[in-house]
Image (cartoon, helix red, strand yellow):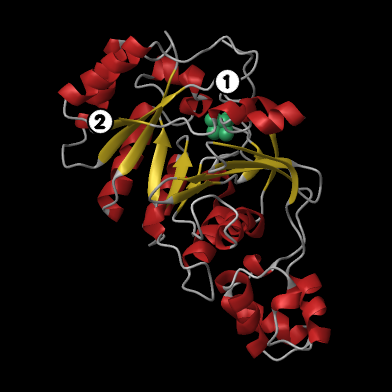
Amino acid sequence: MSRQLPLVFEAPRRGQPPRHWADLSVSERREAMVTAGQSAFRARQLSVHYFERLAADPADWTDIPAAVRSQLSELFLPPLLHPVHVLSCDGDTTVKTLWKLHDGALVESVLMRYPDRVTMCVSSQAGCGMACPFCATGQGGLQRNMSTAEIVEQVLDGARKLAAGQVPGGIGRVNNVVFMGMGEPLANYKAVIGAVRQLTAPQPDGLGMSARGITVSTVGLVPRMQQLATEGIPVTLALSLHAPDDELRDELVPINTRWNVDEVVDAAWEYARTTKRRVSIEYILIRDINDQAFRADLLAKVLKRRGNWGWVHVNLIPLNPTPGSKWTASRRRDEEEFVARLRAKGVPVTIRDTRGREIDGACGQLAAHEA
Ligand code: SF4
């Protein structure tokens, strides 16, 4: 196995970005507008432009006096994300962007357009402190937490591209957001929940997305999973399990030494029970490491033990190897056997498509390469 890095829960306190409109609540926006010497009603005007019309250019804000537009833009919409690389594949319907943040930290987001929907995969931290040895981001450690607005801006960038017809398939909108880019979302809980609220607030106060279209993934920060269940926002929870037994999971997902398989699956089950939302169990298939038939049987047992009322769904992910890694994707026949064994035990299972694979699709690979 690779060298073991320490788990890091507390993000270094550095480099927080300037305040942005998407960091503020509706009442804070009105207060900020008054503090800026403007009428409170301009807050709604600016929100309409930002969240509803997706008009980032102040020249388009024609209901606001020209002299005021640049002031509001500078005060409330400071540029937070600067593109370093934009790569596309799948006929330009998969677009991956490497962003530089104001302090030089690098993060990634990916837009994936399917015939019936658009999914944005976003980052929640610059780097990650969870030290998963198969993951490029984990190997680089944690630089800092991202702010609410830095998270929201990744989605808005995709929304603006779609609204402008820049992604093949005609004018469109973002239907799904998955927090599966760089970082452990629940380790940056406050900013992530803030971003979910901004994305789901009705227009013009937010982007007006359905919470059901949002997936928050975690390696298993149990207290935060429990807290998430009480927020009253029915996002989908995805638990990155990757192994059904503690011996292997301690190595693959080091947070397991803090909260073990039983504890994280209990917390996932409790989330499903409280929210009535089916939990997704993420399982990266790694050749000869976690893809044996007996582990498929054990996974089914671990999940079925909690009941059989459709609370869970397994999402198998073929490993996208980190450059230089000794681990690789499972053989086709092992993958098929793994799926067959889960199905035979009545566990719903799908294999995730591997969009963006040829452009360093796995989280963190582009940033790791750049660094
Ligand atoms: S797999 Fe996810 S949680 Fe683990 S190190 Fe990578 S980004 Fe962090």
252 vs 158, nearest the viewer: 158
Asked if residue 273 lies left or right of residue 68, the reply is left
* x, y percent for residue 149: 65, 60
Of residues 64 and 122, the one drawn nearer to the viewer in this rendering = 64
Mark 1 falls on what kind of element?
loop
Percent coordinates x, y for residue 307 in the rendering = 17, 37
* Res. 57 in view: yes
Residue type at numbered disc 1: Pro
Return the mark for residue 303.
2
Q: In which quarter of the image is residue 235?
A: bottom left
Quadrant of the frame with the C terminus? top right
| C-alpha gap between disc 1 and disc 2 | 25 Å
Counting from the top left corner in percent of width and height, residue 160 is at 60, 61
Q: Earlier in the sequence, mark 1 or mark 2?
A: 1
Which residue shows up at 53% across the image and 76% down it? Answer: 204
**From the viewer's perspective, is 239 left or right of 194?**
left
Q: Look at mark 1 in the image and give the residue it sits on.
A: 133
